[in-house]
């Protein structure tokens, strides 16, 4: 049950904290690293207390377990308080340093208690000190199996019908019930039933009220009209005065009414096409986009793609809109729940104009729509002479270096695909791409011919926007900064986008990451790799087994993190799938540990093969992202490959741990059961931090894969033969 509690807690903490950072997935590395750190500290501290105070009884195990379970909903409440304080106004990017410190500290109590439990469980299972090695390994296996069960419980039942706080309360009740009835705590049956009944009643009465209160507290000054959970993040509709705003995953998507934004996004690219008949609107339709598109008299059909079905249903309910036609004989309007990338890769339809109106790429979910891979799909879905347009927040007259870097990456990435790329300056910088030259001289004529009634995009506005002088000034600004190519395997733009938010907020942390992004990828990998090699060399003299477990924890967790982030870049479904991918990893760990436990002949020499397996898996992950595989292979096959890699990564990790415990852990009373467990967690902690925050964002998938391969080549050479 504690494994079940842990996987549910991880999933809820990650989801809630991602919302604090407006959905930025790189924070997953921070949250999980903090989790691993506190659990490791709890394991070491708990081991010392268990040995010193002789706390190895079921009563103490139950006390710690129930305390940890009750801390789960308490931690969710604390995170929501933090979101309400740090993200103001709602949907804005928080102060990075404050938010990171908060994210690390807020989960400390749960992590410390959970880590301490591992020691008591190991001793209880071993029957004292007689079979300590077997007890440690068995707890490792059963924790992994509990995680697998908890993942399916959370993904398919709790998350589907309950909020995060309600899910946390249910898990707390389940764990408390299992501990109360699962062993000898010297209570009568009546006392046990009464205790669990009181806890359940308190949760049932208090949690819904606290859930509603904390949700409103995250949106001070707003009235929360509706809250829904979805596969892509929590969806909230909140009103203030006459403005209704929609939020997802902590970030603001759009507001209604917002006519200036809708007019700009739609009319500027639409007026560049001589005769737009079919239009695809990816995002933005719910914020007034489709109403502006149908003002063009040439339009015959509009397909409106929205990624999230829950958001689509909620917004359409508020607006009273449905599929069909605007009026008899008017254009056909169809709302489609689909991922834009998957839709374009499978549809045979071709469009005259494709408009993109999704939020800036502050996370990998939105970055998927600004990559060279996505732009290629768009180009293939355009009719001859068709065009593609989107807009990015900018400045009217002055561009900072951080702004120029973002716009430069977008321009460079678009130029990789489209023969003609037009940039139009303003508070929103417009990007328009086409295979043919784009004519700007007939914009006003088309505005008149189509009889478009606008308020903001007018005859007075357009000449200024299309001024040759302003366009050339923008081009000269962008040329002074070299822009990289944004891709799925190197999300360069997301790093620049986050740095831009940091520049606006004056964040030194993000400014430092922005400067690191300017360094050559090989240099970043070389420096970090050199530091680790030095640590391995020094550590082999004092605790080679522990450092070896540390190396495997670092490398395997970093690889698992790469699988998670790569999966998000491919599908955009990580918010929903992270618990399943993590559970598959844990299931593999249980299987690997079980096999090596049963086979006493598996010893130190076989660890070389495990390290070799990690090297091979790393390059297989890189192979999944090769164009030849992703383009030709069916979507389910590519999708399933991530789950297979996650399982094998877990199996190799699980196989390593019992062998080290069997060959290196002394059978002495002074041995701390969780010593190698802590080494494993600390290694994973470092791997999550440098992998999620530094390596993958800065050097991309290829550089990260070579880094992991280097770890698993160095570890057996420097460490395995030392004990």
Image (cartoon, rainbow, N blue to C red):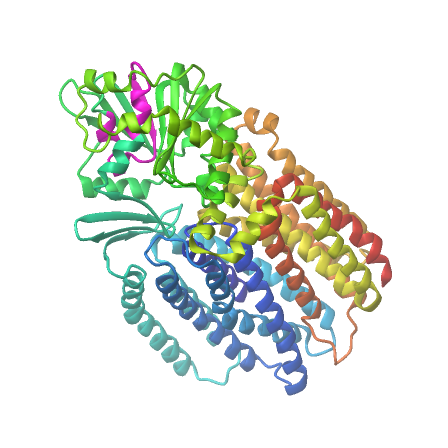
Quarter holding the C terminus?
Answer: bottom right
x then y, percent, for residue 507: 48, 57
Q: Does residue 145 appear to the left or right of 21 in the view shown?
A: right
The verdict on residue 47 being magenta is: no
Q: Indicate whether 209 appears above or below 347.
A: below
Q: Indicate whether 545 appears above or below 199.
A: above
Q: Which residues are magenta?
A: 266-293
Q: How many marks?
A: 0
Q: Residue furthest front?
A: 469
Q: Indicate whether 357 appears above or below 611.
A: above
Q: Does residue 260 appear to the left or right of 137 in the view shown?
A: left
Q: Nearer the viewer, residue 682 or 496?
A: 496
Q: Does residue 148 appear to the left or right of 390 in the view shown?
A: right
x then y, percent, for residue 511: 53, 52
Residue 382 visible in the snapshot: yes
Q: Does residue 20 appear to the left or right of 449 in the view shown?
A: right
x then y, percent, for residue 40: 62, 68
Q: Residue furthest top?
A: 384
The structure residue drawn at horizontal position 48% and vertical position 44%, both measured from the top left corner, is: 402
Q: Nearer the viewer, residue 384 or 512?
A: 512
The answer to which image quadrant residue 394 occupies is: top left
Residue 431 visible in the snapshot: no
The structure residue drawn at horizontal position 45% and vertical position 72%, both measured from the top left corner, is: 71
The answer to which image quadrant residue 55 occupies is: bottom right
């Amino acid at each position: 049950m504690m494994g079940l509690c842990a996987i549910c807690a991880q999933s809820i903490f990650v989801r809630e904290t991602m919302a604090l950072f407006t959905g930025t997935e790189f924070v997953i590395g921070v949250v999980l690293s903090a989790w691993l750190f506190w659990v490791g500290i709890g394991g070491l501290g708990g081991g010392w207390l268990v040995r010193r105070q002789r706390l190895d009884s079921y009563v103490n195990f139950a006390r710690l377990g129930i305390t940890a379970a009750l801390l789960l909903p308490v931690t969710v409440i604390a995170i929501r308080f933090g979101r309400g304080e740090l993200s103001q106004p709602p949907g804005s990017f928080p102060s990075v340093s404050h938010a990171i410190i908060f994210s690390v500290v807020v989960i400390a109590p749960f992590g410390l208690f959970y880590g301490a439990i591992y020691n008591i469980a190991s001793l209880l299972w071993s029957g004292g000190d007689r079979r300590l090695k077997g007890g440690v390994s068995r707890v490792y296996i059963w924790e992994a199996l509990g995680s697998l069960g908890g993942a399916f419980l959370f993904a398919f039942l709790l998350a589907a019908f309950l909020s995060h706080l309600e899910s946390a309360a249910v898990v707390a009740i389940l764990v408390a019930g299992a501990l109360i009835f699962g062993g000898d705590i010297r209570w009568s049956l009546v006392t046990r039933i009464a205790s669990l009944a009181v806890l359940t009643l308190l949760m049932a009465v208090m949690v819904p009220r606290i859930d509603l209160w904390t949700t409103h507290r995250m949106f001070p000054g707003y009235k929360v009209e509706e809250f829904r959970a979805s596969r892509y993040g929590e969806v909230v509709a909140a009103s203030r005065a006459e403005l209704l705003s929609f939020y997802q995953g902590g970030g603001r998507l759009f507001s209604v009414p917002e006519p200036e934004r809708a007019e700009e996004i739609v009319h500027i690219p639409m007026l560049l096409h001589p005769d737009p008949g079919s239009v695809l609107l990816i995002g933005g339709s719910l914020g007034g986009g489709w109403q502006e598109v149908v003002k063009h008299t040439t339009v015959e059909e509009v397909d409106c793609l929205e990624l999230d079905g829950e958001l689509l249903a909620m917004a359409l309910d508020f607006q009273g809109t449905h599929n069909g036609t605007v009026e008899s004989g008017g254009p056909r309007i169809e709302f489609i729940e689909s991922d834009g990338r998957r839709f374009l890769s499978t549809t045979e339809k071709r469009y005259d104009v494709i408009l993109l109106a999704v939020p800036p790429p502050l996370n990998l979910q939105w970055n998927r729509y600004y990559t060279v891979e996505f732009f290629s799909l768009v180009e293939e879905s355009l009719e001859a002479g068709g065009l593609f347009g989107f807009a990015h927040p900018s400045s009217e007259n002055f561009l900072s270096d951080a702004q120029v870097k973002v716009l430069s990456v977008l321009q460079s990435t678009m130029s990789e695909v489209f023969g003609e790329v037009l940039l139009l300056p303003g508070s929103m910088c417009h990007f328009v791409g086409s295979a043919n030259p784009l004519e700007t001289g007939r914009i006003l004529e088309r505005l008149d011919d189509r009889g478009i009634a606008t308020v903001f995009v007018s005859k007075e506005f357009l000449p200024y926007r299309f001024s040759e002088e302003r366009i050339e000034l923008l081009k000269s600004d962008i040329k002074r900064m070299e822009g990289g190519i944004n891709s799925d395997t190197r999300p360069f733009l997301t790093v620049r986008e986050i740095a831009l938010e940091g520049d606006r907020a004056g964040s030194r942390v993000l400014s430092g990451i922005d400067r690191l992004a300017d360094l050559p990828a090989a240099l970043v990998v070389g420096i970090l790799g050199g530091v680790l090699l030095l640590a391995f060399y020094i550590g082999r003299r004092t605790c080679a087994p522990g450092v070896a477990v540390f190396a495997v924890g670092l490398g395997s967790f970093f690889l698992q993190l790469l699988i998670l982030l790569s999966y998000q870049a491919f599908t955009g479904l990580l918010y929903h799938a992270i618990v399943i991918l993590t559970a598959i990893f844990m299931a593999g760990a249980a299987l690997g540990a079980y096999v090596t436990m049963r086979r006493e002949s598996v010893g130190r020499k076989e660890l070389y093969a495990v390290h070799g397996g990690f090297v091979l898996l790393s390059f297989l992950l890189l192979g999944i992202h090769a164009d030849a595989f992703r383009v030709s292979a069916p979507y389910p096959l590519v999708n399933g490959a991530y789950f297979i890699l996650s399982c094998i990564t877990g199996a190799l990790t699980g196989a390593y741990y019992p062998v080290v415990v069997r060959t290196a852990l002394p059978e002495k009373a002074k041995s701390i059961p969780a010593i190698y467990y802590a080494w494993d967690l600390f290694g994973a902690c470092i791997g999550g931090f440098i992998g999620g925050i530094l390596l993958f964002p800065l050097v991309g998938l290829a550089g990260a894969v070579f880094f992991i391969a280097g770890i698993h080549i160095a570890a057996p050479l420097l460490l395995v033969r030392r004990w």
